[in-house]
Image (spheres, rainbow, N blue to C red):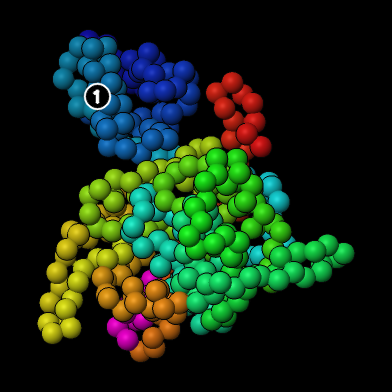
């Protein structure tokens, strides 16, 4: 029988290649340590993919290679070290002057309350003393001007450094620009992708925001041109995903998380907010009815390894407040205002953790398959 030592174990593993990598695990330096205890071989191995399926495949490949090489029943144990890619501490792309943090609020599908969450997040941040602005980037279905009680209002202009800039309208301590200020209520916005992307850039860059702690961008549902234009235009601090607990909404929300986590985009996902989590009738205040399913958003956050930012119940007053142009958070010491406040505090905590642990986000440069830039 062949001698079992470090050299012979390396020889046994020399033909094993990690999935999607060109070099063998020996040549790539993935094997960090080898220990032999009688009939047991223990390996410390560095990998980039933390999934259980990936680990199982590597473990099986290594075990089979060692068994075949030594022709006996050696016990093989693998200890995996997951290597996190190091991000360069740099920002590429043009920052918006005076704006400290830019937060995108997104959803996989429409109708989950993304804009309602955005409006209440904005006013609750303003209530905490932060300087807040909102960009209604839902070009095809703007609603933020209605939720802030500014329907029919028109923004003015201001001279800044010899240039005429758009002056955002303000209500409840929040500055706002929306395509809804420039269209009639019955007018459909029928634009191709490039026109919609140009409109977004104008809302971002032609407005004079002054000093802001947070600029919140309310994105349209899905993963399309507006989203790509945004991540190319500015360095986002992070993205918040809004979903309801039902499976159909969760499937689309997962796509939203995956979009921001793509290697070519790499925008930190601050977490998931579960809207319409449950219904409690006023006559039965101790009862919770999970109309759209239970804890779906929480399960999604665990699956995608992102923070769970909280639940917002299905409450009639939230809808009524949005229609009336006064976000529900402003109702004062109500249970829904408390729930919304908890969500905001969780968002702030996630932002703090993101800023502490990760390098600044850079505006990305996306390319087509032929290599031509989409800038």
For the magenta stretch, what is the residue range? Answer: 334-343
Q: Observer-nearest residue: 196 or 133?
A: 196
Magenta-drawn stretch contains 199: no
Residue at horizontal 55 percent and vertical 40 percent from the top: 192
**Percent from the top left, x then y, of residue 32?**
43, 32
User: Where's residue 27, x and y in %?
Assistant: 48, 19
374 versus 202 height, above or below: above
Question: Left or right: where does residue 216 sit relative to residue 303?
Answer: right
Q: Quadrant of the C terminus?
A: top right
Find residue 244 and report its horizontal and vertical position in percent. 28, 58
**Most frequent secondary structure within the magenta stretch:** helix
On the question of residue 225 being in view, the answer is yes
The quarter of the displayed image where residue 37 is located: top left
Find residue 169 and report its horizontal and vertical position in percent: 62, 73
Q: Is residue 164 above or below residue 190?
A: below
The residue sitting at 27% across, 37% down in the picture is 52
SS at badge 1: helix
On whether residue 341 falls in the magenta region, the answer is yes
Residue that mark 1 sits on: 60
Camera-side residue: 170 or 261? Answer: 170
Q: Quadrant of the N terminus?
A: top left
- Left/right of residue 286 with respect to residue 329 in the rendered view: left
Is residue 348 visible to us here?
no
């Amino acid at each position: 029988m062949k001698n079992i030592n470090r050299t012979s174990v390396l020889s046994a593993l020399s033909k094993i290649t990690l999935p999607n990598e060109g070099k063998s695990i020996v040549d790539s330096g993935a094997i960090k340590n080898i220990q032999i205890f009688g009939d047991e071989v223990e390996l410390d191995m560095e990998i980039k993919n933390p999934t259980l399926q990936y680990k199982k495949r590597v473990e099986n490949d290594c075990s089979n290679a060692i068994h075949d090489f030594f022709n006996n029943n050696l016990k093989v144990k693998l200890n995996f070290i997951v290597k996190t890619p190091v991000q360069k501490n740099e920002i590429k792309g043009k920052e918006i002057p005076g704006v400290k943090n830019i937060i995108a609020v997104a959803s996989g599908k429409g109708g989950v309350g993304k804009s309602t969450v955005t409006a209440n997040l904005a006013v609750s941040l303003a209530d905490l003393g932060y300087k807040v602005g909102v960009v209604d980037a839902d070009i095809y279905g703007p609603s933020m001007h209605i939720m802030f009680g500014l329907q029919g209002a028109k923004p003015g202009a201001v001279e800044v450094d010899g240039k005429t800039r758009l002056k955002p309208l303000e209500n409840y301590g929040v500055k706002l620009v929306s395509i809804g200020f420039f269209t009639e209520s019955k007018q459909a916005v029928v634009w191709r992708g490039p026109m919609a992307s140009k409109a977004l850039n104008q809302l971002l860059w032609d407005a004079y925001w002054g000093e802001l702690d947070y600029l919140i961008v309310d994105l349209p549902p899905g993963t399309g041109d507006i989203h790509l234009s945004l991540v190319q235009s500015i360095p986002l601090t992070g993205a918040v995903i809004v979903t309801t607990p039902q499976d159909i909404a969760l499937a689309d929300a997962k796509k939203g998380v995956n979009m921001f986590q793509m290697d070519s985009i790499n925008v930190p996902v601050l977490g998931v907010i579960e809207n319409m989590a449950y219904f409690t009738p006023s006559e039965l205040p101790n009862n919770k009815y999970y109309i759209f399913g239970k804890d779906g958003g929480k399960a999604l956050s665990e699956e995608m390894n992102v923070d769970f930012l909280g639940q917002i119940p299905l409450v009639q007053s939230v809808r009524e407040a949005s229609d009336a142009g006064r976000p529900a958070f402003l109702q004062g010491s109500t249970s829904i205002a408390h729930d919304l406040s908890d969500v905001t505090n969780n968002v702030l905590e996630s932002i703090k953790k993101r800023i502490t642990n990760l390098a600044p986000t850079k505006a990305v440069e996306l390319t087509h398959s032929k290599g031509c830039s989409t800038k």
